[in-house]
Amino acid sequence: MATIELAHLSDHLEAQDLETTIDAVQTECGTTFTSSEEEDSEILESSIDDDVFTDFRDRLEANDLDADIYVPVEFDDVLQVGEMRIASTHSLRLVLDSLREDFFVEDEEDGETEEDEADDDFERDLSETDESSGYYADEDGGIEMKDEQLRHIWRAVFRASRESIERNMPLFFHN
């Protein structure tokens, strides 16, 4: 099962890899990158079906932005540091906005911003559906169930990317 996590780089990287990663990000974005050590690491979404999460990441890859770690600084490219691929959380937000239509997250014309809508949709989905309801279960639901799972992942990643920026913490994808 795949997970989406906000965590410090030091939680997942060895000292040498950590230094190399920070240097690569700083070289790419031209600014100092430090993660907020005051914030606690947190798993934002777990028990995501690996196949569906891979499909979601394939869509990020099609937009040249699939990575294992997203850091809350602005730069354009995906950096390869050892085995890890690193990208910008800000760039992830832009790609998520462009993928919005693919996941059938419709814009309403009631004056809310897209971010407010996604947050409202995400909160509503969390209150209506949970893992115990078979949301990620291997049930016969075909394409409709997979589409719903992709929409759920899109909303979770959208929310996680916002939290990454607000809390100044890297976002990790594990699968």
Image (cartoon, helix red, strand yellow):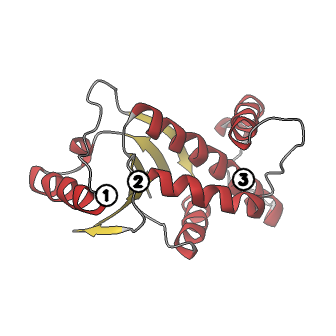
Q: Residue furthest right?
A: 109
Residue holding disc 3: 151
Q: Nearer the viewer, residue 98 or 50?
A: 98
Residue 80 shows in the view: yes
Q: Quadrant of residue 124?
A: top right
**Disc number for residue 123:** none
Residue holding disc 2: 74
Q: Nearer the viewer, residue 135 or 170?
A: 170
- Residue at 81 percent across and 59 percent down: it is 141
Circles 2 and 1: CB atoms closer than 8 Å: yes
Residue holding disc 1: 29
Q: Earlier in the sequence, mark 2 or mark 1?
A: 1
Residue 56, position in %: x, y?
Answer: 60, 63
SS state under label 2: loop
The nearer-to-camera label among 3 and 2 is 2
Residue 85, position in %: x, y?
Answer: 34, 65
Residue 153, position in %: x, y?
Answer: 63, 51
- Residue at 62 percent across and 56 percent down: it is 96
Query: As drawn, is 123 to the left or to the right of 104?
Result: left
Q: Quadrant of residue 17?
A: bottom left
SS state under label 1: helix
Query: As drawn, is 116 to the left or to the right of 144?
Result: left
Q: Earlier in the sequence, mark 3 or mark 2?
A: 2
Q: Earlier in the sequence, mark 1 or mark 3?
A: 1
